[in-house]
Image: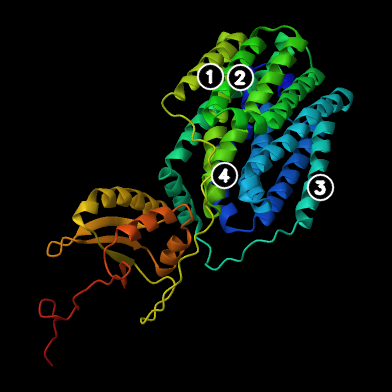
Amino acid sequence: MMASISQSENMVALVQASTTLPLMLFSLLSGAIADNYDRRRVMLTAQVFMFCASTLLALFAYLGLITPWLLLFFTFLIGSGTALNNPSWQASVGDMVPRDDLAGAVSLNSVGFNITRSVGPAIGGMIVAAAGAAAAFAANSLSYFTLVFALYRWRPDLPKRTLPREALGQAIAAGLRYVAMSPNLGKVLFRGFVFGFTASAVMALLPVVARDLIGGGALTYGIMLGAFGAGAIAGALANSRLREMLSSEDIVRCAFAGFSLSATVIGISPYAVVTSLALVVAGACWVLALSLFNTVVQLSTPRWVVGRALSLYQTATFGGMAGGSWIWGLVAESHGVTNAFFASSLLMIVGVGIGLRLPMPPFASLDLDPLNRFAEPPLSLDIRPRSGPIVINIDYEIADEDLPEFLAVMVERRRIRLRDGARNWALMRDLENPDIWTETYHTATWVEYVRHNQRRTKADAETTDKLLALHRGKEKPRVHRMIERQAIPPTDDVFHKPHVEPH
C-alpha cells in the first residue's frame, strides 16, 4: 500500500522499520512480563490489542483516510502488539515440550509460521488485486479470532510460584545481568544483530523490487513473499538434518553467504521467476539463521529468565532489522535499489568473517533444570521477606596444594553468583589461619536471597561439587547468614545534646 501512495523508496522501507522498531524498544519489558506473569494472558492481551489496531487500519483504509505517516503509525501499533506477544509465545514453546525436544519444537514453530508466510501473502495479494487494500486489512483483522479462541482454550499445567513476583525494574535488571554474565548469549545477540541489519534489505525493499525492477503490482509482491516463505519452510524442514551434519557456526556462515548471493541476484534481476528463485534461497537462509539463534538462546537459558533472554535476542535482531530497513531505504533513494542490495551483500560477507573471532556456541545442551538442593533454613530472628540487606559468608578450608584449582573454580563461582543476582561478591583469606577462605556476597532482601538460591541449575552443581571436594574441613563449609544493620548514634548524645531553655 505504501508503494501505491508514496513514490519514496525510503517511505516504503520505513514500513518494515516501523514494524520491527517496537520489537527493539519494548521486547525487554515484554520479556520481564513474560517471566513474571501468566504467559497465556499476556498473549491474549497482545492479540486483542493487535486486533483493535488492525481493525482501525482497515477502517481508515476503507474511508480513504490513510496517509504515509498514518500507515506507519498503525504498523508501529501492530508491531508493539507483536513485541508484547513474541517473548511469551517463544518462551511457551519450552512450557509445552521436554528440553530434549526443544530444538525440534522451535523448528516446527518456524515451519508453522512460514507455511502461513508462504500462503498468506499470496492470498493477500489476490485480495488487494480484487478488492483493494482495505479488504486485505479486514481479512487480517478477522484472523485474530482464531488465535484468541485457541489461547482462550489452552490451559497449560505450570508449576505454582512460591515467591512473589519481581518488580518489573528488578526483573529487567536481572535479565540484563544474566545475559551480560553469559558469554554464549552475547555471541548470539551480536550475530543476530548483524544478520538482522544486513538481511533486512531484502524484506524492506521487496515492494520497490516488485514495482520498479519487475514492473509488477500487489499480486507480484504477494507471490514473491510466498516464494520467500516457501524457502523458509524448506529451510525449517532441513534444520534437523543440517544440525547433524554441520556445526552451529557452519550453518550461520552458510546462511550469511546464501543470503548474500540471493540479495545480489534480487538486486540485478528484471525477471520475476529468477527473483522468486533467489527469494526461495533467501527464505531458507533466513529461517536457518533465526531458528538456530532462537534455539541456542533457549538451550542456554533456564526457564526463570528465558523470556527476558529471548526478548534481548529479539531486541538485538529486530533492532538490526529496524535500523537496516531505514539505512537501506536511504541508500536506495540516494544511490538506487541495485546499489543498496550490493552494499548489503558485501556486509553479509563481513558477517561470515565475524565467525572467525566470535564463533557460535555448539549445540550441546546444558542441564538448566532447577537444582532444587536449597532448603530455606530455620531462623531464630523473626524477619520479613523484604528484610535486608542480607550478607552471606561461606567458610572453606583449603590446602595449599589445592589453591590453584580452588581459585580457578572460584572464578566460575563468582560469575554464577553475580549472574543469579548476588552483589558485592568477594573472596577473603584469613591472615591468622591461612587455610580458611571466606566467600562473601550480599542480596538486597531475604526473599532475594531465597530467589538467588532457587535460580541455581543442575549445570551449576558441578562448580559446587568441585568446591566440596576441595574443602578439607571435617564438616561441610560453614554458611553464615546475617542481616546488615547500621549503628547510628542517637541525636541526644553528648555531642548533639538538645538545647533546653531554663525555666
Q: Which of the 4 quarters of the picture holds residue 200?
A: top right
Residue lying at 68% horizontally and 48% vertically, measured from the top left: 46
Residue 420 visible, this orientation: no
Q: Earlier in the sequence, mark 2 or mark 1?
A: 2
Mark 3: few/some/many CA within 10 Å (<14, 14-19, 20+):
some
Q: Which of the 4 quarters of the picture holds residue 235?
A: top right
Marks 3/1: CA–CA distance: 39 Å
Residue lying at 30% horizontally and 56% vertically, measured from the top left: 425
Out of 428 and 449, give the one closest to the viewer. Answer: 428
The percent position of residue 473, horizontal first and vertical second, equals: 26, 67
Mark 1: few/some/many CA within 10 Å (<14, 14-19, 20+):
many
The percent position of residue 226, horizontal first and vertical second, equals: 77, 24
Q: Which mark is residue 298?
A: 4
Marks 4/2: CA–CA distance: 24 Å
Out of 390 and 103, give the one closest to the viewer. Answer: 103
Determine contact: label 2, label 1, CB under 8 Å.
yes
Amino acid, disc 2: Phe
Mark 4: few/some/many CA within 10 Å (<14, 14-19, 20+):
many
Label 2: which residue? 259
For discs 3 and 4, the disc positioned in front in the rendered view? 4
For discs 3 and 1, the disc positioned in front in the rendered view? 1
Amino acid, disc 1: Met
Amino acid, disc 3: Phe
Label 1: which residue? 348
Tell me the element at label 4.
helix
